[in-house]
Amino acid sequence: MWIDITQTMKKGMPNWPGDTPFSFEIAYTKQQTGSVNIGKIETSLHTGTHADAPFHFDNNGPTIDQLDVNTFIGDCLVIDCRPHSIISAAFLQAIDFQGVQRILLKTVDRISDCFPQHIPIIDAEVAALLKERGVFLLGVDNPSVDSLTSKEVQAHHALYAHQIQIIEGLDLSCIEPGLYDFIALPLKIEGADGAPVRAVIRKK
Ligand SMILES: Nc1ccccc1C(=O)C[C@H](N)C(=O)O
Ligand SMILES: [Zn+2]
Ligand SMILES: [Zn+2]
């Protein structure tokens, strides 16, 4: 059984302060077209469950359409990080990744209806550890891998420097730690800095 770990995209969903909120409307009704309803959306590409492309924080980095789909399909390990406000390399060092190349960090019991005030930050040293263990995808149940006020976005840069792709805004509310199959494919938007994903996992 596949489990959906995607936030539902809807009006009023949590949004990065000042960024474009998500909206969806029927632009042309069935009555207007005489045949079909046609919806349209407007959204920041960093609202809800999404992948960051390196171009998000590096003008020379690849855009979302240029990332390898194989990164986003395969085994993953869900790790419980709940007591920690800083996710350090020392904490992750002790965890057996079981040869898995994608890890998802669960940092909250359930995701909130509101944009969080504080989120745990990921120590920039984590990137080197993950690289050493063969991990190439890091997913979090937060809007960012860096602090909400960071301008340097060190964790983003460190992860990119170690070829580790980022997924943010997962909903791991009812998910127990452990090994899963994972699929979270970003929409193929040319030149984009990120894209929504539909993220699903299945217990191994
Ligand atoms: N949406 C934004 C609007 C303005 C400034 C930053 C953002 C971000 O999303 C950055 C965040 N560091 C991120 O992890 O993607
Ligand atoms: Zn993002
Ligand atoms: Zn990000």
Image (cartoon, grey):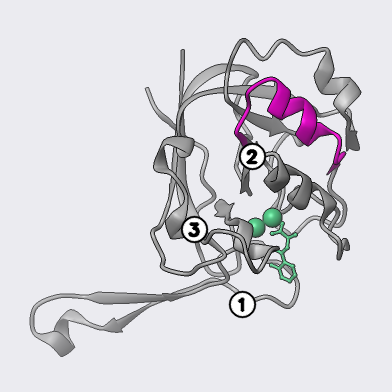
Residue 151 placement (x, y as % from top left): 86, 65
Rendered residue at 78%/31% (across/down): 128
Magenta part of the chain:
121-137
> What residue is drawn where x is 87% and y is 21%?
91
Sequence-first tag of 3 and 2: 3
The residue that disc 1 covers is: 20
Residue at horizontal 72 percent and vertical 23 percent from the top: 132
Q: Quadrant of ligand 1?
A: bottom right
Under circle 3, the secondary element is helix
In the displayed orientation, state which residue is furthest to the bottom.
Answer: 32
From the top left corner, tell me how far across and down residue 147 is, in percent: 86, 54
The residue that disc 2 covers is 164
The amino acid type of the residue labelled 2 equals Ile
- Whether the magenta-drawn stretch holds residue 122 is answered as yes
The residue where tag 3 is placed is 64
Q: Does the magenta stretch include residue 95?
A: no
Q: Position of residue 61 (x, y in %)?
A: 61, 60
Asked if the residues shown at circle 3 and circle 1 are in contact, with their CB atoms under 8 angstroms apart, the answer is: no
Looking at numbered disc 3 in the image, what kind of residue is underneath it?
Ile
Q: In which quarter of the image is residue 100?
A: top right
Which quadrant does the N terminus fall into?
top left
